[in-house]
Image (cartoon, rainbow, N blue to C red):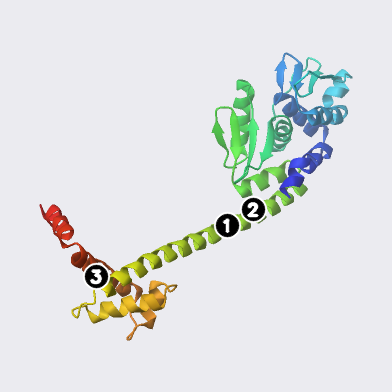
Amino acid sequence: MEKNLRLGKFWDEWLTAETASRVQSDFEVAGLLAGMRHSGMIFHTNRLRTARRLMKLWPSTTYYERFAFTPAISLITQKHHKPRVKITCPDVTLKPPSNMRGAWAWLKGIFGSAGGLYFPKSGYHLALIISDEKISALASKLLARTKLAWSEHRHEFSLRNHEDIMTFLCKVGMNESALAFDHMAMMRSVRNRVNVTSNYEAANIARTVKAAREQIELAKRFLALASPSLPSKLREVAELRLNNPDDSLDELGKKLNPPIQKSAVRYRWQRIKSYVAEKINPEKVLNLYAKFFS
């Protein structure tokens, strides 16, 4: 699903969508041009689909009726650079939208010329990148009216919330893409949850195995003391560990007679550790106690 969105199916719906009225076409064309780099009424874009969308919409705009003029479009190619489109428009005033229907049409246009839906290795986000300060200020006002959780950093506006991205795509008429995105986000969420669970279980098993190995070595040292004064409860835990090297502390506690809780088993291991330390290297233990109480 991510691959399909990246390869163009996502933009195919944006490119071929119909508009509801001439006024809607006007605002979308204004948004398309607003997202491009420009000098006067000469616009530049590296997105060929943006020029195609402009040419599709222009005959249905009031600008075409009033001026009977079609934008002049030329393709510029340079070695080691992506092809770019130069668009020369008539000297007309592109009015900003005054209501939310017009605002959504304008945002659809600027999304096509200066935005995108991105899928890094983790997460996803929808972004509008606008370099022109006046256009950026206008976009900020219109985006605030959408009631979506837009974040703004310099001239980049982004949505990271799943539901907000869905709402934006539906509002700009990209319903199929919204459904595809929803499915992709759900699958990614499931994969992430499975990965987190498996990583946690693997780490937990590794910790259990490491602790068991240390306890086996400690149990051998403890029983090797062969002293008649060895506490019976501690001896019982040490022998049980040697006989059950793969068991967790909870499982060891249940095999004792009578059974005890995991915390009690852990406490007995601490006593075994202290007992072995005192018997094997009493001077080191005394030095530690002296340092602690000094």
Binning the other alpha carbons within 10 Å of mark 1 as few (below 14), some (14 to 19) or many (20 upward) gives few
Left or right placement of residue 71 versus residue 34 in this view:
right
Q: CA distance from mark 1 to mark 3?
A: 38 Å
Where does the image place residue 182, in percent across and percent down from the top left?
69, 52
| Disc 1 target residue | 195
Binning the other alpha carbons within 10 Å of mark 2 as few (below 14), some (14 to 19) or many (20 upward) gives some
Q: CA distance from mark 2 to mark 1?
A: 10 Å
Of 92 and 78, nearer the camera is 78
The reply to whether discs 2 and 1 touch (Cβ–Cβ < 8 Å) is: no
Up-down relation of residue 110 to residue 80 (above or below): below
Query: Could you tell me which residue is drawn at 77 percent across and 46 percent down?
Result: 4
Can residue 99 be seen in this snapshot?
no
Can residue 289 be seen in this snapshot?
yes
Left or right placement of residue 222 versus residue 253 in this view:
left
- Under tag 1, what secondary structure? helix
Q: CA distance from mark 2 to mark 3?
A: 47 Å
Of 245 and 99, nearer the camera is 245
Query: Could you tell me which residue is drawn at 66 percent across and 55 percent down?
Result: 187
Image quadrant in which you'd find residue 25: top right
Where does the image place residue 201, in percent across and percent down from the top left?
51, 63
| Disc 2 target residue | 188
Binning the other alpha carbons within 10 Å of mark 3 as few (below 14), some (14 to 19) or many (20 upward) gives some
Type of amino acid under label 1: Asn
Give whichever of discs 2 and 1 has the lower sequence position: 2
Of 113 and 76, nearer the camera is 76
- Under tag 3, what secondary structure? helix
Type of amino acid under label 2: Arg
Q: Which mark is residue 271?
A: 3
